[in-house]
Amino acid sequence: MADFKQEIARRRTFAIISHPDAGKTTITEKILFHGGVIREAGEVKGKSGTKAATSDWMTMEKERGVSITSSVMQFDYSGLRINLLDTPGHKDFGEDTYRTLVAADSAAMLIDAAKGVEKQTRKLFEVCKKRQLPIFTFANKMDREGKDPLELIDDVESTLGIRCYPVTWPIGMGDRFVGLYHRLEKKVYKYTKGQVAAEILEVSGWDDPVIESLTEKELYDKFCEDMELLDVALGPFEEAEFRSGMLSPMSFGSAKNNWGVDLFMEQFRMWAPGPGIYQADDLSPVDPNEKSFAGFVFKIQANMDKRHRDRVAFLRVCSGQFERGMKVKHQRLGRDLRLSYANQFQAHERDTVDTAYAGDIVGIVDTGNFQIGDTITDGKTLKFSNMPRFAPELFARLSIKDPLKKKQLQKGIRQLAEEGAIQLFIDPIVGEQEPIVGVVGELQFEVLLYRLNDEYRLDVRLERLPFSVARWPRKKESGEPLPLNDGLNGGAKIYSDSRDNMVVLLAREWDQGWLEKENPDVEFHTTAGL
């Protein structure tokens, strides 16, 4: 029993969130470097770069230097077993990030020191806030000129409504960046351009003459003013406030130069929470230390290995112990399955896993049994809260020149829909022969066409449709979905989604008002529960 609880206690599962181009994938690489996963902390590959990011495994990600899908990496650090979830920053893939955050116990929020809190960061923070996730903040790119550190703190606090506690503080910025003062350790980490390792200087406090000797008078005076203000304005770091998502430990550095990342990792080691309690749909708490196994699927990825046309269901273990080959109860299907093949990951690199514990992320080789949101247990009947699908705003039909490949196209888009990369809508009269594809953003269409060509060898044409709104009708009194054969007043065209829920596609939001007037007993929802 002691070993079981000790293994769970050393698990840490966290996600990295940021706006695109804030340096998220770069800091992920450096964290892996400090975790001993990679020997060289290399650059993220751009369009004409020479090295691909470890966490970006998809061909299109490597070519364009942009994260398209969440990736999972496990490694050991200072006695902890860490599950790191690298999420896409681009708004078009926000739904993938949302589902990934459901599987995390804490988050690291990366902000660009020159730009502060950006639009996508705000959206992702709101998801974290709803789950009361503890959040670390890392102000990146201090090797460049940017906002004043106090201005950055004000930006985070006023925009996101969370208080910051700066653990480290920059001495200078851009070309005049000297290093970081650690407020709790009373140490200076002096950095030199072109060198990763810092020179560590013991000081008596922020007003130690050693710091004055490191920089010019103007910068030192500004540093002293900032320190005086922080000492007056801030009380001690309260871990309880951090755990409740009200206070964020903040650190500064440059992921590109690997400055300050090790200090961030030490903060993570000290304060990041272990596996938390999940709540089942019947409101019963699922404690991670329960012996009874339970978990949920938050992500599905097809073709991680194109040679084998594989499909992996990513499972968050919520309680108990997972063992390869164990028999589990699939709650949605209502039948038993044996999990014979399971992996843990460092992006696309995988190792067979024999045992995993609450807090771990396990990749189950799937033959088509799993969908996003599925719950599996060792027999106990329970279901975890739904993960919603967000309403797409762009719609199209797909066609292929070669009629002999039509079934192959149907299989491809069905698999990508099961991943959550796209949404499918079926005309009940026409059937699955001509499904409509819906996405949140333009880049998702690009990724869809690219993957159909790259992974399925299909030359597909995309025909835009004049819809911009999808709504799921539900009965006002009970909240239950409307049966497909019920119909609606007002002449709306009815489709079914991939789970046979009724959905209406509209040209504009104004049309929803007409439907509500014609169907007073019906509510039109912007999300469909999984």
Image (cartoon, rainbow, N blue to C red):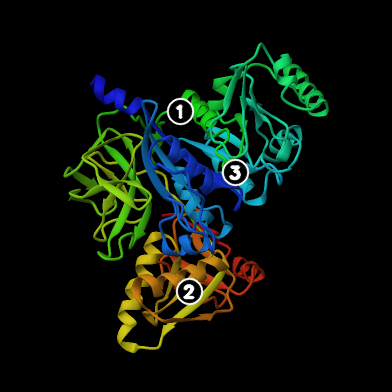
State which quadrant residue 274 falls in.
top left
Q: Which mark is residue 273?
A: 1
Q: Callout 2: 10 Å neighbours few (<14), some, many (20+)?
A: some
Q: Amino acid at mark 1?
A: Pro
Q: Which residue is mark 2?
A: 494
Q: Residue placed at 71% from the left, 45% from the top?
A: 114
Asked whether residue 103 appears in the rendered view, the answer is: no
Does 298 appear above or below 321? Answer: below
- Structural distance between the alpha carbons of marks 3 and 1: 19 Å
Q: Residue placed at 30% from the left, 61% from the top?
A: 305
Q: Residue placed at 40% from the left, 88% from the top?
A: 401
Asked whether residue 353 appears in the rendered view, the answer is: yes
Q: Amino acid at mark 2?
A: Ile
Q: Callout 1: 10 Å neighbours few (<14), some, many (20+)?
A: many
State which quadrant residue 176 falls in.
top right
Q: Amino acid at mark 3?
A: Glu
- Which of the two labelled residues, at mark 2 and mark 3, occupies the earlier sequence position? 3
Q: Callout 3: 10 Å neighbours few (<14), some, many (20+)?
A: few
Image quarter (top left, top right, bottom left or bottom right) of the C terminus: bottom left
Q: Which residue is mark 3?
A: 126
Q: Find residue 309 and report its horizontal and vertical position in percent.
A: 27, 65
